[in-house]
Image (cartoon, rainbow, N blue to C red):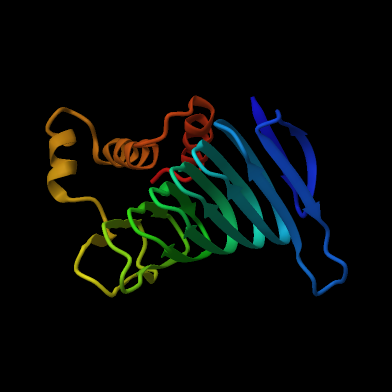
């Protein structure tokens, strides 16, 4: 199993095969930033654990042509700024499943679909207890590219903000760009989603959704009608919301353990 553990701004351990090359460029000054470059040159799966604590970090993923790359990211810690860049060449599929449990984080995610038939499926989950800011830029740089970005956040005591921009320039045709964003806000605190589509031609399939609020009453009613009290019904709905789409048992267990700390 390919696995990299990052502790603050350093690589604490790595167990990788020949499909992945990793380079750490440490910061040279207090105001600089450490950069981890991960190059993927063959089909593979990678588990990336990031332990943050007042961390500023950039992580670049360079995925070559004709590759199927699956990536699991688990981030824990506090007070962090992390920038991710995904550079994807032709006929490659990148599937990302990511979970954050971080107090105060600012993230930027940049996706560059650089080759024909480049494709990204991105699924993000988070339990928010403080302040979380997420900024996405999805660039369809050539035709026949696909982006499916899905963000599911549960805000239990903090504030959450998502801005996601998808861009398809004039002359870049037959692309699909989808944004699906939902924040379950269990507080009266402000949460926001700003979906933006920059589409400069008609031959594109573009969709977005942005939902903020609690669960629907009929969802709760269905569970309560089967003898489940409201508190446990909420717990089941939140668990299902955060676990949906996640196919890794260990990551599901981490989410469930975190949820047990913040049950209503």
Q: Is residue 22 left or right of residue 172?
A: right
Whole-percent x and y of residue 256? Answer: 47, 34
Above or below, 45 against 218 in this view is above
Q: Position of residue 243 (x, y in %)?
A: 39, 36
Residue 202 as seen in the image, left or right of residue 176: left
Please state, as top left, top right, bottom left or bottom right, where the N terminus lies in the image.
Answer: top right
Location of residue 78 with respect to 235 vertically, above or below: below
* Residue drawn at the location 17% of the way across and 42% of the way down: 219
Identify which residue is drawn at 40% across, 52% down.
116
In this view, the residue in front, 245 or 178, is 178
Q: Nearer the viewer, residue 173 or 55?
A: 173
Number of numbered discs present?
A: 0
Q: Place residue 177 in its image quadrant.
A: bottom left
Residue 250 in the image: above or below residue 138:
above
What residue lies at 26% left-to-right and 37% top-to-bottom? 233
Q: Is residue 201 left or right of residue 51?
A: left
Q: Position of residue 66 (x, y in %)?
A: 49, 38
Q: Residue at x 57, y 58 (%)?
A: 85
* Foreground pick, 174 / 136: 174
Q: Residue 142's spot in the image, x, y percent?
A: 40, 61
Corner quadrant of residue 208: bottom left
The reply, left or right, for residue 85 in relation to residue 150 is right
Q: Is residue 6 above or below residue 256?
A: below
- Asked which quadrant contains residue 176, the reply is bottom left
């Amino acid at each position: 199993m390919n696995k990299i553990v990052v502790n603050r701004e350093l690589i604490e351990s790595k167990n990788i095969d020949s499909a992945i090359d990793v380079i750490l460029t440490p910061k040279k000054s207090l105001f600089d930033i450490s950069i981890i470059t991960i190059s993927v040159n063959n089909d593979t799966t990678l588990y990336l654990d990031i332990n943050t604590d007042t961390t500023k970090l950039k992580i670049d993923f360079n995925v070559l042509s004709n590759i199927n790359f699956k990536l699991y990211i688990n981030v824990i810690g506090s007070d962090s700024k992390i920038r991710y860049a995904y550079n994807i060449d032709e006929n490659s599929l990148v599937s990302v499943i990511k979970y954050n449990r971080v107090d105060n984080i600012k993230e930027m995610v940049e996706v560059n679909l650089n080759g024909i038939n480049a494709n990204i499926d991105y699924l993000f989950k988070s339990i928010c207890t403080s302040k979380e800011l997420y900024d996405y830029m999805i660039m369809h740089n050539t035709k026949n590219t696909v982006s499916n970005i899905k963000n599911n956040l549960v805000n239990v005591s903090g504030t959450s903000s998502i801005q996601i921009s998808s861009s398809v320039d004039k002359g870049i045709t037959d692309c699909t760009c989808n944004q699906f964003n939902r924040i379950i806000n269990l507080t009266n605190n402000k949460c926001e989603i700003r979906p933006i589509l920059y589409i400069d031609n008609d031959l594109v399939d573009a969709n977005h959704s942005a939902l903020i609020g609690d669960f629907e009453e009929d969802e709760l009613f269905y569970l309560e009608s089967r003898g489940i009290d409201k508190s446990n019904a909420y717990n089941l709905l939140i668990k299902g919301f955060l676990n949906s789409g996640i196919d890794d048992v260990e990551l599901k267990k981490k989410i469930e353990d975190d949820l047990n700390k913040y049950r209503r």
